[in-house]
Amino acid sequence: MAFRFTSDEEQARDLTQEVFIKVYQNLENFKGESSVFTWVYRIAVNHILNFLKKEKRRKFIRLIDQNVKDAIMEETQSGISASNNPTPAQVLEDEERTRIVKSFIDELAPNYQVPFTLFKYEGMSYKEIAESLEISLSAVETRIHRARKQLITKLEPWLKHL
């Protein structure tokens, strides 16, 4: 998760190590009101977001580790299919698609980026996201819905080219 938030392998390793140190130092504070996974995940999200704020980064998440065609298909419900043996031209096209979609995800407000990213790319349930971000379940649903809507709107003009 740290790598997905920072896009920097070395920094992600440092952040992960710092998170586990924080978990160890705060074991006595775990009240058991949620699962250990949720508690650790929340510490990680908070630590990483604090790092990003401290570094005054304008963008909180740089993500897309799946094939861009698949991501577009998920968001637009279109039937774009990926080739099993891409040609060099297809690889270049995929890289361009990745750049375009990443730029649109990066333009989302952080309160939409974070839940969308945790759901789509970290595989967390709405409930887990709500617990991790300490927001209501309906807020998670609304934010993910709005993120999807914004992405679809931004991607529509590109669908002919993607």
Image: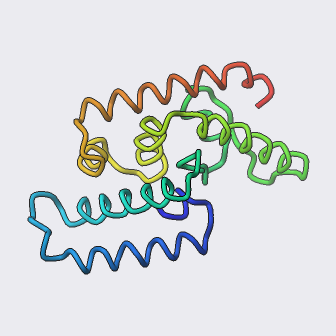
Q: Observer-nearest residue: 156 or 49?
A: 49
Is 124 positioned to the left or the right of 66 in the image?
A: left
Q: Is residue 53 left or right of residue 128?
A: right
Q: Nearer the viewer, residue 139 or 29?
A: 29
Percent coordinates x, y for residue 52 in the rendering:
51, 56
Q: Position of residue 96 (x, y in %)?
A: 80, 42
Residue at 47% in and 45% down: 117
- Residue 127 is left or right of residue 72, and the answer is left
Q: Residue at x 25, y 59 (%)?
A: 38
* Type of colouring: rainbow
From this view, report whether residue 9 is shown above or below residue 57: below
Which x, y percent locates residue 63? Answer: 58, 50
Taking depth in this image into account, of 49 and 94 the one nearest to the observer is: 49
Number of callouts: 0
Quadrant in which residue 156 is drawn: top right
| Residue at 23% in and 62% down | 39
Q: Is residue 144 left or right of residue 25?
A: right
- Point out the image quarter for the C terminus: top right
Measured along the vertical axis of the image, is residue 37 above or below residue 76? below
Q: Is residue 151 above or below residue 29?
A: above
Q: Nearer the viewer, residue 90 or 130?
A: 130
The image quarter in which residue 74 lies: top right
Residue sitting at 41 percent across and 44 percent down?
Answer: 119
Q: Position of residue 139 (x, y in %)?
A: 29, 31
